[in-house]
Amino acid sequence: MISAQDFLILSVDISLVMLLLAFLLTIVRIVIGPTLPDRVLALDMLVAVGIGFIAIIGIKTGYFLYIDVAIALGLIGFLATVAFSRYVLNRGTVVDEGGDPEGNYNIIEIEIRQSAQSAQPASAQTVQGDS
């Protein structure tokens, strides 16, 4: 019969091998691509694999502060994924004054602009219209 300690050591070793395989496959996906969203997704997966490595090393060493580090890495990885995704979404577009890339404004922005223009004196509106 296998003891609980031996089972834990075996489980940790198997999980490290599986994480190493996932790490290598993720690196291949980052290098091959073929598109930028594939690479962004692979980078997110790389963060998840890193979190797994940190958690397994924390279990193996018995130093559970590593779990807190893994949680912090998860938060940072989430923010990085959101930033990369936003970059991919807005790549090559210029957004004017709060509108979307097509130049559309939502109804609140239109109402604010209209109320701001109606509050200005007529001479100020003429000067702005000439420029």
Image: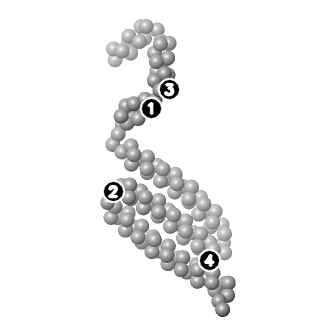
Mark 1 nearby-residue class (10 Å; few <14, some 14–19, many ≥20): few
* Residue that numbered label 4 is attached to: 60
Disc on the earlier residue, 3 or 2 = 2
Q: Earlier in the sequence, mark 4 or mark 2?
A: 2
Q: Residue 25 falls in which quadrant of the image? A: bottom left
How far is disc 1 from disc 2 in space, using C-alphas? 28 Å
Please tell me whether residue 53 is drawn above or below residue 106 in the rendered image. Answer: below
Distance between the Cα atoms at labels 4 and 2?
37 Å
Q: Is residue 11 above or below residue 113?
A: below
Give the labeled residue for mark 3: 108
Asked if residue 20 shows in the view, the reply is: yes
Residue under the image location 62 percent in, 77 percent down: 60
Q: Crowding near pointer 2: few (<14 within 10 Å), some, many (20+)? A: few
Give me the disc on residue 98: 1
Confirm whether residue 97 shows in the render: no
Going by the image, does 9 lie left or right of 110?
right
Q: CA distance from mark 3 to mark 2?
A: 36 Å
The amino acid type found where label 4 is placed reads Lys
Helix, strand or loop at label 4? It is helix
Disc 3 secondary structure class: helix
